[in-house]
Amino acid sequence: MMVGSTGIAAAIAHIAFWLLLARTWAARGPRTAALFFGLWVAGYVGLPLVDGSLFFMSYVAVLDIVLVLLIFRGDVQIFR
């Protein structure tokens, strides 16, 4: 089975989400982590019902962005 660039991007987004969710638990508490887990479950269950299963990867990427902004209180600086 061959995996294209979208499959690799989806895997990276999901790995980043679960790592950021664990970091959210440590930094902001279990309530915030549970909120984002609930949003993930809502997207996982809800998007296929409205024929939006192709958008799930983008949905997880947006959750990743929001978690980064929430945890690090802004964008992560790569270059200084």
Image (spheres, helix red, strand yellow):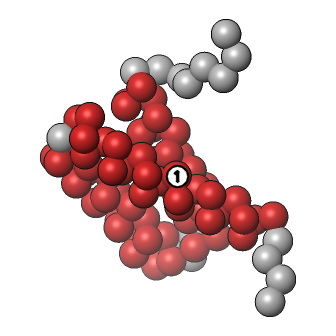
How many circles with numbers are drawn on the protein? 1
Judging depth in this view, the residue of 7 and 47 nearest the camera is: 7
Report the residue at 82% width, 71% height from top. 4
Report the residue at 40% width, 21% height from top. 73
Question: In which quadrant will I find the C terminus?
Answer: top right
Judging depth in this view, the residue of 54 and 12 nearest the camera is: 12
Compared to residue 2, the image places residue 75 above or below, namely above
Report the residue at 72% width, 70% height from top. 7
In the image, residue 52 lies at what x, y percent? Answer: 57, 70
Compared to residue 65, the image places residue 8 above or below, namely below
- Residue 45 in which image quadrant: bottom left
In the image, residue 66 lies at what x, y percent? Answer: 45, 37
Report the residue at 57% width, 73% height from top. 53
Let me know if residue 59 appears in the view. no
Q: Tell me the element at label 1.
A: helix
In the image, residue 47 lies at what x, y percent? Answer: 48, 70
In this figure, which residue is indicated by the disc labeled 1? 16
- Residue 46 in which image quadrant: bottom left
Residue type marked 1 = Ala
